[in-house]
Amino acid sequence: MISIRNVHKSFNDLQVLRGIDLEVEKGKVVVIIGPSGSGKTTLLRCLNVLEIPTQGTVSIDQLSLSFEQKVVKKQLLELRRKTGMVFQSYNLFPHKTALENVMEGPMIVKGLPKERVVSLAQGLLEKVGLGEKADQYPHQLSGGQQQRVGIARALAMEPSVMLFDEPTSALDPELVGEVLKVMKDLAQEGMTMVVVTHEMKFAKGVADEVVFMDQGVIVERGRPEDVFNQPKQERTKQFLSLIE
Amino acid sequence: MISIRNVHKSFNDLQVLRGIDLEVEKGKVVVIIGPSGSGKTTLLRCLNVLEIPTQGTVSIDQLSLSFEQKVVKKQLLELRRKTGMVFQSYNLFPHKTALENVMEGPMIVKGLPKERVVSLAQGLLEKVGLGEKADQYPHQLSGGQQQRVGIARALAMEPSVMLFDEPTSALDPELVGEVLKVMKDLAQEGMTMVVVTHEMKFAKGVADEVVFMDQGVIVERGRPEDVFNQPKQERTKQFLSLIE
Amino acid sequence: MAPMFLSNFFENPDRVIRLWEIAQSSFWPLLEGALKFSIPLALISFAIGLMLAVLTAVARLSGLWPLRLLARFYVSIIRGTPLLVQLFIIFYGLPNLGIVIEPFPSAVIGFSLSVGAYGSEIVRAAILSIPKGQWEAASSIGMTYAQSLRRIVLPQAARVSIPPLSNSFISLVKDTSLAAVILVPEMFRRAQEIAAFRYEHLLIYVEAALIYWVICMILSFVQDQIEAKLDRYVAK
Amino acid sequence: MAPMFLSNFFENPDRVIRLWEIAQSSFWPLLEGALKFSIPLALISFAIGLMLAVLTAVARLSGLWPLRLLARFYVSIIRGTPLLVQLFIIFYGLPNLGIVIEPFPSAVIGFSLSVGAYGSEIVRAAILSIPKGQWEAASSIGMTYAQSLRRIVLPQAARVSIPPLSNSFISLVKDTSLAAVILVPEMFRRAQEIAAFRYEHLLIYVEAALIYWVICMILSFVQDQIEAKLDRYVAK
Amino acid sequence: QDTPNEESTGDTSGSSENDVNQDISENGEETLYDKIQAEGKLRIGTEGTYAPFTFHDDTGKLTGFDVEIAEAIAEQLGLEPVFMETQWDGMFAGLDAQRFDLIANQVGIRPDRQEKYDFSDPYITSTAVLVTHEDNQAVNDFEDIENLKAAQTLTSNLTDIARENGAEIVAVEGFNQAIELLVSKRVDITINDGLSLLDFLNQRPETPIKIVAKHEDAAYNGFMFRKGNPELVEAVNEALEEIKANGTYLEISEKWFGTDVSE
Ligand SMILES: Nc1ncnc2c1ncn2[C@@H]1O[C@H](COP(=O)(O)OP(=O)(O)OP(=O)(O)O)[C@@H](O)[C@H]1O
Ligand SMILES: Nc1ncnc2c1ncn2[C@@H]1O[C@H](COP(=O)(O)OP(=O)(O)OP(=O)(O)O)[C@@H](O)[C@H]1O
Ligand SMILES: [Mg+2]
Ligand SMILES: [Mg+2]
């Protein structure tokens, strides 16, 4: 369903991704872990082509883009619209209410009529447990609430895959749970998800596959119980000991 | 050694601290936990009088300040100089190198001669494992390194007590360890410390006492094994279940 | 040589009375100059200039280097040379090329170009001050560059740029006095006319300055209102 | 009527040659006016004005309301009234009170007050833009308010305020042309003098504008250098 | 208050794509004067801030000696006078840029100006007076001003007189500035137009200045034109003759100065 082949990404001289291959089947949850600077965020950003890979192929559903030659802008947009992204720092639009944040995509990008979008957005806010907060501005919400609005905003575009980049690491510890719960529910509903996170409990409980990245390559991958309990690679062991 | 009696603090109408009593003996480590907004940061800031309590008494060593009446600025400064503060967001001075950050206090506040301060600062940087990084600017250091410079900067003033406000919660997970190690070493050397943190392992391993705060009061306190394993209060139980 | 009051009041009460009369009789003509010319000129030029400013700022940030270069050149020329000379060129220079523009439109052109250049730097800085995450969030829900700019970035940049822009506007109100040189009878020109007849330059200039001051205070007040309104979505 | 070249060169080569001669012969006097008066005036006023600006900004942020009010009033008056009128009052008004100041010092006073007022808003904004954490970190190592300000906040605020301050400086260079009205023989005054004898106002004003432009470009270049230097402690 | 500034509808560009500075083409088809006649409007540049020659009165109306003479001439020519007001430098630039057809602003007829511009016959003779501060006892005549500071506008016969007598020139932009400098004792003297000084002292009798001497040489002021329009100059000269002959001139002269200022 999602397939990345031999993706490379450099910034000037810095090679950040050095040949990544990854398949994610429909309805599966993949968790990516790895030290800071290993390229996790960059990989997610290549998946939704916020960053254009220097080399390689990215396919989602039927649409496949090869980055060996220059790509057409329109195709980029098309690929991007198949993904929904949730950011570490929420990145809500501060000048719009929770409801308007969720409405923005369907209304402006898809051009759906306003009434339909309002009920769609209201529904999504209820789904993430924030039906009451529709008219609040982001600064009036707690971090966990903001992040849940962020999830609703991404869902509003009905993406084929949801990408999460450390969605809970900016949150106060007692707020982490409410966001993870929404993500768990999504996974149970069959959403395809790629999640960068250091929440081990989530990874162990929800992930179908765990991928450990370091220095721009995938060092180890497998079922969560295997990777966490019997890591094969030295680097994986070392990393797991640091974060436990 | 340190003693807080009946400390209240309000911001306009908002009562943030509602009668806090706390004693910390010389060489002991107290860990404060509690949900976001419970007043942990405010308590620390009252201890080093960055925030002036609306009511109550704060004593460190022989110096005791009562906030029933207006206090003299000079006494505030004196009390403050007995404490060293380490911030969640490091707050290094970005226009000064690591060494200069550490030198600033002894040189400007204490007025010590430059040569002596250089060697003092260099020694402290070595103590936190950053002897090599003396001439780097903060933006050239990782988060963990910045936080260690922050600790060295506070130590340079030779405080009677060190205050830590979530010193690792802005750090990438694999960098948390290096900061906790420096703090553990300090505790072993007999430094008096008050630490707000959610790092359970640190609390369990290092703390002499754990204090659980909620809504501006101390709900429960005791030895770490007691508070974590057999909390007496319902609120404590609930909070511990959220962050585990 | 006006504020003789201080030293001369007791020696020369007649003169003080005369000055007071002059100040009174010149008040309405000055105010009329302000209301009919200075303020409309400032308002119109600012509105046009602001559009120019946004266009120029976007051009400066665009990926096309000829556009960037053009915008840069425009800003450099306008900011690098005195407004008075620019007005001179538009009004007295362009006719040499067969382009003859009336005084008021000439002034509008000159002031708009000026606001456009100075304003573009303000708008550009404001756009750059919006966190990259906002662009990314907009892109991530599928918005194009233009959509992100219009719906997400510019509205936030507007809030940031109000204080410096209102500075520019206040400067503009005072700069309209330069329009006298190209035959626009704005307030300062009126002051000169009255002063020439009454021979009380300082008195009348001070009076004009006070009127400018009141206008600027009103503008500052309006600015505060707008800021407060836009602050509704920002934490206190 | 200068840029006749375009339409008239073939019809009227004599006139073009005459214009060229005038342009040449006026270049040195203009440059002299710039080097001996405009630029020194701008530099001295800016230096003094900057000190005033910092003092005023600190006063605006101080806990003492009379100080705040005074600073506010000063800024409001200076920003609310035209610089020309201010110069007029200093030079032609103060003698009524027995205070007679020479042209150049009068100009320095006028421009410094102006830089001080506009600059104070810039410096104030820059100080406010420094994160509260910096103040707290400084306090936490025992620094007093004054020490925190001098050692920690102002150095960082300096970096933030360079772009807007250099804008002010560039404006100041052009505004020195107003000193003509109080007899300072700066560049624009020279241009007027030459034009008055040669009757080629547009030509000579354009020439003066080009010199201003070159000066401003040099200043912008210097600004870039300073910014780059101060950026050494900021992430790229 | 209705200074007819905005009425300058004369778009001269229509007939002159190429020959910008010359109002007659080589073939001598249509002269500036023809054009003026066709439009019926005479566009006159003036400062509007130089009493009593060209200034705004209590009601805000543009008036003064030069203004009324120009009006009388326009009437004589069957044209509607359109006054356009600007500063001294703008006046010259405006004439060059064909925004006006002539300037009526007490412009002295001087050889250096005649190199670039044409003048009408003089319509006023002005006399120079030497003015000092009341307290000044040292200056009694033109020979006393050597090495003294004289406030003078940049180009005028008055400045020449000051210079010839060895004064140090402090250049000012106008009459009023010269008086201000004199009163604040920043300069020692000014040599200025006798008529405007009389008007000033009439308005501000308490001003601490005094006239100490009159210059015997008279200076002539005329209307100023772009070069190359002999027909217009000729027509204005004829009209000037005419209003002198029919008494209009004398009437205006006496209204403003109580005497005939043509000689
Ligand atoms: N736009 C960019 N320009 C230059 N270098 C970049 C850019 N984005 C990322 N990098 C570099 O690429 C490397 C990988 O960054 P990336 O953000 O993908 O790491 P990460 O695994 O997400 O780390 P973290 O856990 O800290 O978020 C880092 O060295 C980073 O400095
Ligand atoms: N300067 C201030 N002005 C007004 N209210 C404040 C101020 N500082 C703190 N508060 C309020 O006081 C309450 C307690 O804040 P405090 O920062 O002490 O909580 P905390 O326990 O440190 O929380 P966290 O875990 O999020 O850091 C919060 O409701 C906060 O909004
Ligand atoms: Mg990342
Ligand atoms: Mg806190």
Image: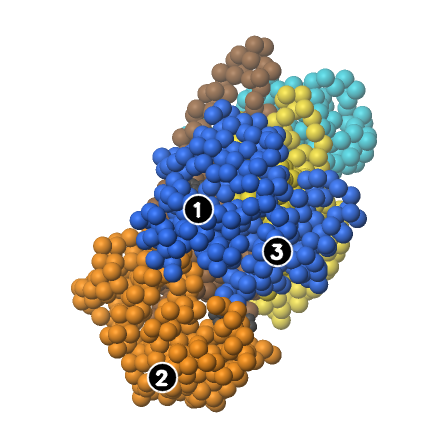
Chain colours: A orange, B blue, C brown, D yellow, E cyan
Q: Which residue is mark 2?
A: A24
* Residue E2 visible, this angle: no
* Residue C6 visible, this angle: yes
In terms of image quadrants, where is residue A181?
Answer: bottom left
Instruction: Report the residue at 70% width, 21% height from top.
Output: E133
Instruction: Report the residue at 66% width, 64% height from top.
Output: D16
In the figure, is residue C208 to the left or right of E111? left
In the figure, is residue A108 to the left or right of A57? left
- Give the number of the disc on residue A128: none
Check disc 3: other Cα within 10 Å, few if <14, some if 14-19, many if 20+: some
Q: Which residue is mark 3?
A: B185
Q: Amino acid at mark 2?
A: Val
Q: Quadrant of ligand 2?
A: top left
Q: Is residue D198 above or below residue E31?
A: above
The one of E15 and A175 positioned closer to us in this rendering: A175
The one of D92 and B132 positioned closer to us in this rendering: B132
Q: Is residue A230 above or below residue A86?
A: below
Give the x, y percent position of residue A170. Answer: 43, 60
Q: Chain under label 3? A: B
- 2 and 1 marks on the same chain: no
Instruction: Report the residue at 68% width, 40% height from top.
Output: B109
Give the x, y percent position of residue D189. Answer: 67, 45
Q: Amino acid at mark 3?
A: Asp
Mark 2 or mark 3, whichever is nearer to me = 3
Determine whether the residue tagged by mark 2 lies in a helix, strand or loop. Answer: strand
Q: Which residue is mark 1?
A: B222
